[in-house]
Amino acid sequence: MGIICCLQAINQDAYKDIANGDEQVLEELVEDDDADDSFNFDRTWDGIDYLIGKTSAGRNALLTFLKTGGIEIEYNNMGSAVDTVRAFSLQEVYEIEKALVSISEHEFRSNFDSEEMNADVYPQTFHYDGALDDLCADFFELRDFLSEARGANKALLVWFA
């Protein structure tokens, strides 16, 4: 198993606390393995980020949210594999979700080129039967997760473990 990309929808009060440096609130959220408002995915997150970047909507700087953006917070829990958490406001979640929804399945699929992705993303990671279907399934789950977060007026945390 490789690096896992973790997303957690959080309420605005938690976002404000974290943005103001409340390490205890951040630790409780990051270390909660049973969080209801979370979405984790491995292997495909880097490919999804790559394919989003090749879409017309991908020119929106917020769509690099899996790797950059938000408020970057150093995570200092010594027993954790997490070193940085990024927090996105409710407004940023709204803008990210709106841009993701504008990407059609056809556009997302049409940007897939396993040879190019193996050279530019990870060698041999997307060179198997069903790779595109796995990427599409996780992309649409990610999009649905963000739609639910936006609908519930939630902010977002993103980190890698």
Image (tube, rainbow, N blue to C red):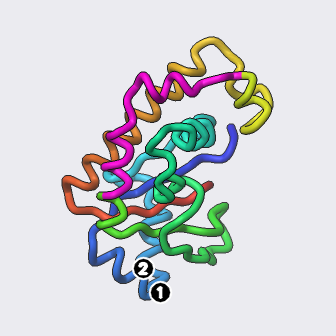
Q: Which span of residues is magenta-colored?
A: 95-114
Q: What secondary structure is marked by label 2? A: helix
Residue bearing the label numbered 2 = 18
At 30% from the left edge and 66% from the top edge, which residue is drawn? 90
Q: Is residue 147 left or right of residue 21?
A: left
Q: Residues within 10 Å of mark 2 (few under 14, many from 20)?
A: many
In the image, farthest residue toward the top? 129
Left or right: 160 in relation to 31:
right
Percent x, y for residue 127?
71, 20
Residue 121, given in percent of the width and then of the height, sits at 72, 38
Q: Is the residue 102 above or below the residue 113 in the image?
A: below
Contact, mark 1 vs mark 2 (Cβ under 8 Å): yes
For the residue labelled by badge 1, is the local secondary structure a helix, a strand or a loop? loop
Position of 22 relative to 58 (above/below): below
Q: CA distance from mark 1 to mark 2?
A: 5 Å
| Residue carrying label 1 | 21
Q: Nearer the viewer, residue 151 or 74?
A: 151
**Quarter residue 54 falls in:** top right
Between 4 and 108, the one lying in front of the other is: 108
Callout 1 amino acid: Gly
